[in-house]
Image: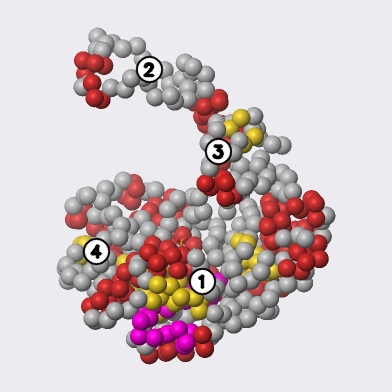
Amino acid sequence: MRNTRATQSLFTLSKPGRRGALLPACDVPEQPLESLLPPSALADAPPPLAELAEPDVVRHFTNLSTLNMSVDTHFYPLGSCTMKYNSKRNERLVALPGMADLHPYQREETLQGMLRLLFEMQEMLGEIAGLPVVSLQPAAGAHGEMTALFVAAAYFRDLGQRRTKVLAPDSAHGTNPASAAMAGFDTLSVKSNPDGTVDLNDLSAKLDQDTAVFMITNPNTLGMFDGQIREIARRVHEVGALIYLDGANMNAILGITRPGDFGADMMHFNPHKTFSGPHGGGGPGAGPIAVTERLGGYLPAPLVARDAAGVYRLDYDRPKSIGRVRAFFGNVGVLVRAYCYIRTHGPDGLRRVSEEAVLNANYLLSQVKSFLPVPQGDRCMHEFIASATKVKGERGVSAMDIAKRLLDYGFHAPTVYFPPIVREAMMIEPTETESKETLDAFAEALRTIIEEPAELLHAAPHTTVISRPDEVKAARNPAVRWTDGVTKQ
Ligand SMILES: *Cc1c(COP(=O)(O)O)cnc(C)c1O
């Protein structure tokens, strides 16, 4: 049943004079506001706020929260985003008063526990990356990319080299060229082979003394590990450029291989993906970066250091640092959850996470490929791309239609139309936290959907409050006023 009440705004529910709390009668003489505040601090009229009782507000937000999909309510195979289940234990630990009530302006001697945790986090991420020097400051993966490119720019400036170009494969996430542009580089796209790996000839043709960085995602956005990575690194290093690894796909290789060992000079982690921080409309992420020893000096200051006496402190004495990219110590709440996740699993557990993520993806791939083509082959890492080109050609049913219809079956849609090099792409990433039963049910829903009447699919979803908003218009011209459960755009 549609929940129309939750689609009204608090302002439509407002009744003048309704209150959530009753204050006791004032037992001191009342003072006019004008006698207490200067005229500049007084408004002409009270703010036009909704007037409601507490149950109105609680029901409104509780009902609203049920209209969305989340990993706590639904299977969420959103490729590239690693929407694994977020353990509630990590939420409990990060909410402990010793964590949550710290203030970043406290003196360092009163922050020793947190500083130790952050120090150990730097060490652990350095170990997982195979790149020893780590900054926890960046606030998201994309921010990590940009920060690392600033680091690269500072490094080349220091060497007296003027390098203006950043290369990335045409399968790259949009944040790669965007970060390069924001860091002041020209970006060039390198072609992929039909199997999604880097076209080495095209790479070599574009690599020269002007190239600063080659950004690569490995496993790539097609869910394939590019086995040419050593050769790629050799060619990039030969012209004096650096390799940046987009670490969004670390969930496939934890404890199995390390970016530093296969040639990366810099990388970012997405703790909100790989290490199970809640994300997707659900709060901030983080984007710690790890770099080689020779780039370490350029990282944002401060890093967390431990002195000979075992005291933890913030090390600002980093003369080559690019400076701060984020207030305080970064998004500590996300980092603490990730710390709990890493410590809980331990090295062997992390490896099992990746092995099971890859197993689940391959199990689902083996089911899906019997009715939706998977152009890049029979095996994958932690995710794979199915293509709806066949049903599109035969019956006019697009990847978007299928994705929308999945909502009616109680599944979040996979990522669609990314990476752009696969037509009608549906990028499916089940993660390791899903059971065989869930994967079977999802495959069954997909199989059923692609045989449903095209008209039904074009109008899907049919069970949600809103069916198909104009996404561009919704972003550019958001409707904040609701009437009768119907949005006016
Ligand atoms: C998610 C993702 C990013 C960006 O990370 P954010 O934390 O969302 O900024 C970059 N590259 C790839 C491949 C991703 O999947």
Q: Is residue 267 visible?
A: no
Pointer 3 with pointer 4, Cβ within 8 A? no
Identity of the residue drawn at 77% across and 72% down: 370
Which kind of residue does numbered mark 4 sit on?
A: Gly
Pointer 2 with pointer 1, Cβ within 8 A? no
Residue 415: x and y in percent read 61, 61
Which kind of residue does numbered mark 1 sit on?
A: Ala
The verdict on residue 213 being magenta is yes
Residue of label 4: 323
Judged from the image, the secondary structure of the residue bearing numbered disc 4 is loop
Identity of the residue drawn at 28% across and 48% down: 102
Q: Which mark is residue 172?
A: 1
Looking at the rendered image, the disc whose residue lies closer to the viewer, 3 or 4, is 3
Q: Is residue 145 left or right of residue 220?
A: left
Judged from the image, the secondary structure of the residue bearing numbered disc 1 is loop
Residue of label 2: 23
The verdict on residue 371 being magenta is no
Above or below, comparing residue 405 to residue 317 in the picture: above
